[in-house]
Amino acid sequence: MPTDTSTDGAPQGDAVTNLAPSDRSDVAADRVSGLDALELAPKTDKGALGKRIWASTWPKLLAIAIVVGAWQLVFLSGWRKPYVLPPPADVFAELGELITEPKFWDGVQLTMTRALTGFALAVAIGTLLGALVSQFKPLRAAIGSLITGLQTMPSIMWFPLAILLFQLGEEAILFVVVIGAAPSVANGLISGIDYVPRTWLRVGQVMGMRGIAKYRHLILPASLPSFVSGLKQGWAFSWRSLMAGELLVIVPGTVSIGVRMQTARDLNDAVAVIAYIIVVLIIGILVDQFFNAADGALRKRWGLTAS
């Protein structure tokens, strides 16, 4: 008998069950994609780009002005000597000199290379661990609480062990960065998978989704918002661990942001110390903005924000 098809040629009814397993997965994925398209928020015109940029920028500028103003008032009050708490003008002048030095950018490059390498390893390990724990109940019962416990551990507690294992080397820093960030990534994925509606899983099963196709087209997209939050938290842990590591583990022959800050502290150069604190803060804010943009785009895509 001929196979029943719809107007677009897709098999209908019992005809799907006569297809090969891979073909059934493809048909099911197409149907789920079509259903998702009905729920996704339509693209809307948000107005001029300049207005949107200004709307998101002026609150940050106001916050910076308030902080700098408060800093200046504290300096004028004489609470601390100028060599301990310098005025904003001196610090910003130091920043202006720093950004013109090639060695400064070499230090930024080294720090960011460490950060991205450690975070990438943490994402790979955390994602694999989260997928396994969410899939196998005995594994969750065995190490589920351990993952949460590792997430709450202060990163600085790992450095004595890291130094014993890897001496004063790059591996010691990466070890602490990975072990600080991977549990957050794993918990983000586990939480996202846990909150996938059971109805969706049953619908996917009826449509013939099995194995990789089920994860690719149903579970991973549904858990993506929570996973992105886990990535953001994982980055925060990895960045804090890295900064602590660069202050505690000084690898011979390398000059990173942490090393330069430690050198400034040893010289009692408060202007340079605060300048490097601002550099670390700026990098953290820029990366946070990237994650916020990704999260905002995802929320808009799923129709979770106002038009």
Image (cartoon, rainbow, N blue to C red):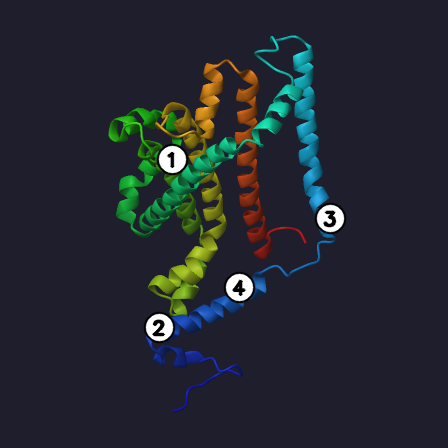
Q: Secondary structure at mark 1?
A: helix
- How far is mark 2 from mark 3, CA to CA? 48 Å
Query: Would residue 257 be found to the left or right of residue 137 on screen?
Result: right
State how far apart marks 1 and 3 are (Cα): 38 Å
Q: Amino acid at mark 4?
A: Asp
Label 2 vs 3, first from the N-terminus: 2
Locate residue 140: give its quadrant: top left
Residue 22's disc is 2
Residue extending farthest bottom: 1
Mark 2–mark 4 distance (CA, rounded to whole Å): 21 Å
The quadrant in which residue 152 appears is top left
Q: Quick one: label 1 or label 4, which is nearer the N terminus?
A: 4
Question: If you read the primary sequence from the N terminus, does the residue marked by circle 2 or circle 4 appear first?
Answer: 2
Front label number (2 vs 1):
1
Q: Can you say which quadrant of the picture contains the C terminus?
A: bottom right
Q: Residue at x 33, y 77 (%)?
A: 20
Q: In this figure, which residue is indicated by the disc labeled 4?
A: 36
* Mark 1: few/some/many CA within 10 Å (<14, 14-19, 20+): many
- Residue 226, horizontal then vertical, whole percent: 47, 47
Secondary structure under tag 3 reads: helix
Instruction: State if disc 3 and disc 1 touch (CB < 8 Å).
Output: no
How far apart are the alpha carbons under marks 2 and 1? 40 Å
Give the residue pinned by disc 1: 177
**Kind of residue indicated by mark 2:** Ser
Q: Residue at coordinates 33% horizontally, 63% vertically from top-left?
A: 211
Residue located beneath label 3 in the image: 50
Q: Position of residue 232 (x, y in %)?
A: 48, 41
